[in-house]
Image (tube, helix red, strand yellow):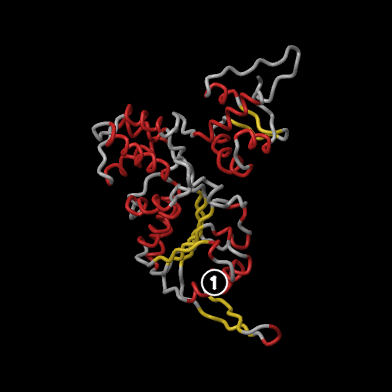
Amino acid sequence: MSPDDDSVAGGADRLVGAVADGDDLAVEAALRPKDLGEFIGQTRVREQLDLVLRAARARGGTADHVLLSGSPGLGKTTLSMIIAAEMAAPIRITSGPAIQHAGDLAAILSSLTEGEVLFLDEIHRMSRPAEEMLYMAMEDFRVDVVVGKGPGATAIPLELPPFTLVGATTRAGLLPPPLRDRFGFTGHMEFYEPAELELVVHRSAGLLDVEITAEGAAEIASRSRGTPRIANRLLRRVRDYAQVRADGRVTREIAARALEVYEVDARGLDRLDRAVLRALLELFGGGPVGLSTLAVAVGEERETVEEVAEPFLVREGLLARTPRGRVATPAAWRHLGRTPPEPAAGGQPGLFGT
């Protein structure tokens, strides 16, 4: 299984998964900000992008090609649509996995209109032949279409109208330097601070006609793992709980009770995250333990543990990847209400001084 598979990378079936499923995409379309002024968070990227777009409009030309990198759910697709809106241009949306042949890309490029924005999601998963065709298209607005096969094949140059490519990737390190260098602007999307997520929750609650208190928004934001997509998803589930088991108003208490039902704890960990930590602590004494052994202990695939659960646990300082295996940190012991074991008498201190 590829680490980029939706069932692995991001966990689309998890309430705290950052990959969007069909329901998320439909709701996101309604909640998505329409311009940079409405966009919350990513202050530095937003300011830099605003300068790029204003300058392009002043020149009366198309904007430079833009590369947006960062984890799923942080707003890369939203920013691509804002770029098109700010430039008063249409947008064409596709993805790297959908372009497996150079002909697929040539068909898309040849149908673009002048100034159009082409959004290419997961650009690092595009095939190599299509990638090489993209070099010339981005730099010279031209592609060579090969007609025929073998010695009789002929390359026909095809001129393209000026367009703006917006590439999005969750793995910027996988992009080859020749492709990365052809982007005029590169923005890295950071995880959101709780205060920023509170603003996201309040804005979304207004659009969804949900009455919410400041404390209720803060409770949801604190469990959203720094990701607006997760914050919006949790808000919808809390709204459901408030409508069915309360008076429809979202308070801190209602939000906490609702998310307890959905097994999202105060730190944003869900069932899978806690299962990994419990196995590490209860079965292996905090580690170190190999990834495959840990995956068997929690009844999941190795890739699921490595790509879905571990990134957040590592970012939260609850788990460490070491050459000897996975190790629980003292924070993991405390989060599960356990006391870290004392080091053996006369022994060397552990990895984290325990």
* Front residue (pair 94, 91): 94
Q: In which quarter of the image is the C terminus?
A: top right
Residue at disc 1, secondary structure: helix
Q: Position of residue 237 (x, y in %)?
A: 36, 39
Q: Residue at x 54, y 76 (%)?
A: 142
Q: Position of residue 66 (x, y in %)?
A: 49, 59
Farthest residue, direction front: 299
Tell me the amino acid under the disc marked 1. Asp
Occupied quadrant, residue 295: top right
Horizontal arrangement in the rendering, residue 349 relative to residue 180 (left or right): right
Q: Position of residue 18 (x, y in %)?
A: 47, 45
In the image, is residue 139 above or below residue 36? Answer: below
* Front residue (pair 69, 345): 345
Q: Where is residue 226 in the image (x, y as percent from the top left)?
A: 45, 39
Horizontal arrangement in the rendering, residue 27 relative to residue 120 (left or right): left
Kindly identify which residue carries mark 1.
104
In the image, is residue 262 above or below residue 67? Answer: above
Q: Residue at x 58, y 67 (%)?
A: 100
Farthest residue, direction top: 345
